[in-house]
Image (cartoon, helix red, strand yellow):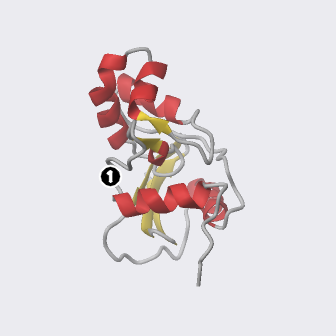
Amino acid sequence: MESCIIQSPLGFTKITGNENGIESITVLNSDEMVSDIIPNVLEDCVYQLNEYFRGERKTFDLKLNPQGTDFQKQVWDELLNIPFGKTLSYLDLSKKLGDVKAIRAVANANGKNPLWIIVPCHRVIGSDGSLTGYAGGLHRKQWLLEHESPYKQQSLF
């Protein structure tokens, strides 16, 4: 398994993967040393993430290999269908997966998403529009949603 750490606007980010695909992308809550050398199998992921942060990329084209249960993978696959700049409620996500009663299990699987940003769990919000739950912290979820919003907030001063 190869890994590297990059700097992003939201903090240090660890990427792991191998020839089978990217296994995890995690924002870290501590200062880390940025990797001097990016392993070949992770170069495209780093490149695409940097494009995303510069506002030049809306979709990702990477081989993914997240580790989880079949149910978690089903939820993560459905997350990939949420378009850039759009949100979906946990309830709507449960409905798309065919079981409105599974909302807690869906929310739990969403929270265990190992592929930060690439699998856009940040696009899932509460039914009332609230920014509920985000493993990377609600401030990061808000930043990501604002970054993807077609309506950019202008500074008044």
The reply to whether residue 40 is in sight is no
Q: Which residue is mark 1?
A: 135
Q: Position of residue 147 (x, y in %)?
A: 58, 61
Q: Residue furthest bottom?
A: 157
The reply to whether residue 66 is in sight is yes
Q: Residue furthest right?
A: 56
Q: Nearer the viewer, residue 75 or 18?
A: 75
> Which residue is depicted at the point 35% across and 29% down?
106
Q: Residue furthest front?
A: 156
Q: Position of residue 88 (x, y in %)?
A: 49, 36
Badge 1 amino acid? Ala
Q: Quadrant for the C terminus, please.
A: bottom right
Q: Position of residue 40 (x, y in %)?
A: 60, 58
Q: Nearer the viewer, residue 140 or 31?
A: 140
As helix, strand or loop, the secondary structure at mark 1 comes to: loop
106 versus 56 height, above or below: above
> Which residue is depicted at the point 40% across and 36% down?
127
Q: Locate residue 42: give its quadrant.
A: bottom right
Q: Nearer the viewer, residue 18 or 104?
A: 104
> Which residue is depicted at the point 45% across and 59% down?
142
Tag 1: Cα neighbours inside 10 Å, few (<14), some, or many (≥20)? some
89 versus 6 height, above or below: above
Question: How many badges with numbers are in the image?
Answer: 1
Q: Locate residue 3: give its quadrant.
A: bottom left
